[in-house]
Amino acid sequence: MPRKLEKHKKSAFYLIAFLIILISSLINFRLWQVNREYKRVIEKLNQQIQENAERGLKVVKVTDGDTFMLEGGVRVRLADVNAPELEFCLGQEAKKRLEELVLDKPVQLPFTRPDKFGRLIALIYQGDVWVNQVMLTEGLGRYDSTQTIKEKDQQLLAATHQAKKEKRGVYSSRCSQKEPPNPKCPIKGNIDKKRGKRIYHFPGCAGYNVVVIELDRGEQWFCSEKEAQAAGFIKSEQCYGKKWQP
């Protein structure tokens, strides 16, 4: 019996190993197919861009403040620009402004690169208007180094500095707040930019006064610790075990 059991165990092990290798091979083959098809689409689009360098390609849909779709179904993301999600502060306004700039109009894309989501990251021009620069100068998006194209990158960074200096758009008191609009709801729900960790702070916590709530990023004000915790925020370590007393 022990030998038969050992034999069955080995057979099961080899079968499982075979299935793992088979599934892995099928997944890799499918990924290869998808990657090949994606490269083909990008090559075709780049050819269209070159053939229509002066006339441009028509924008048929704007998704939000930093993404739109070209005729033919290719999605384009504005390089260096991270606009607010539609439900956040100025999200709808950013989308509307991008629609004003490009919807139903031909755009030129002199510099592009693909990203992992199947989009083109691009510098966008509509005639003489540099769309990326307009969105950043008006504060309708924050500078995004993860979506950058090196060509003219410093000019776009300068546009962001200008918007910050003039407190425009997402840098205005409408979206970036140190003081609570409602004194009864002073708890700050802050999102760590590097780790995405959601942390809340209340008066009495160390560093509370320097925390800025950026509503365009999805940060929030809360009226109680319970409310903050229900939204997925955890108490800051700077609170040292304190409890908020309204």
Image: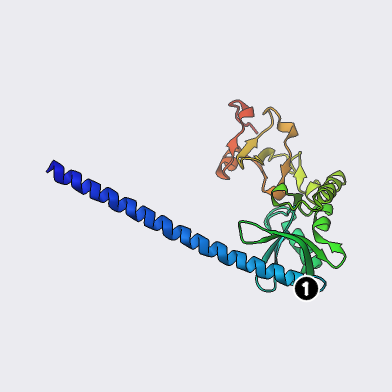
Residue on which disc 1 sits: 52
Image quadrant for the N terminus? top left
Q: Nearer the viewer, residue 21 or 242?
A: 21
Image coordinates of residue 6 in percent, x first then y, are: 19, 43
Q: Amino acid at mark 1?
A: Asn
Image coordinates of residue 178 in percent, x first then y, are: 76, 39
Q: Nearer the viewer, residue 220 or 198?
A: 198
Q: Nearer the viewer, residue 74 or 110?
A: 110
Quarter of the rendering containing residue 46: bottom right
**Left or right placement of residue 108 versus residue 13 in this view:** right
Image coordinates of residue 186 in percent, x first then y, are: 69, 38
Residue drawn at the location 47% of the way across and 61% of the way down: 29
Residue drawn at the location 84% of the way across and 53% of the way down: 137
**Does residue 74 appear in the picture of this structure?**
no
Q: Farthest residue toward the left?
A: 1
Within-10-Å neighbours for mark 1: few <14, some 14–19, many 20+: some
